[in-house]
Each structure stands twice: as structure tokens, then as C-alpha cells.
Amino acid sequence: MEDDLETQVCMLQSHMYGMITRVQKNEDMLKLFQGLEMRLLSLN
């Protein structure tokens, strides 16, 4: 039973790291689009 719990914890940890990576990529993309938006707005 302890091995099963340890396996579940490892799987959850792996899933969490994957989610954190996606969040960081999304944040980078958001910053990129915000920068582009500001550049476009300054053209007027």
C-alpha cells in the first residue's frame, strides 16, 4: 500500500511539474502578445 501511495505522489508531482511548465509558457506568450499590442497601439 505504501508503494501505491508513493507511486501516486510521484505521478501527481510529475503532473504538477507539467502544469507549471505550461503556465510558464503561457505567461511568456502573454508577455510577448502584450508587447506586440503595445507596439501596435503606439503606431497610431
Image (cartoon, rainbow, N blue to C red):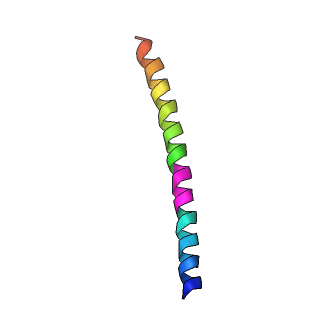
- x 51%, y 56%: residue: 19
The N terminus sits in image quarter: bottom right
Q: Is residue 19 magenta?
A: yes
Residue 42 or residue 11, whichever sits in front: 11
Residue 44 position in % (x across, y down): 40, 11
Question: In the rendered image of this protein, does residue 7 appear above or below residue 42?
Answer: below
Residue range (magenta):
16-22
Residue 29 or residue 43, whichever sits in front: 29
Q: Quadrant of residue 38?
A: top left
Residue 17 or residue 42, whichever sits in front: 17
- x 49%, y 25%: residue: 36
The mark tally for this picture is 0
In the figure, is residue 40 to the left or right of 10?
A: left
- x 44%, y 12%: residue: 43
- x 56%, y 71%: residue: 11
Name the magenta segment's main secondary structure. helix
Residue 27 position in % (x across, y down): 49, 40
Question: In the rendered image of this protein, does residue 15 appear above or below residue 43?
Answer: below
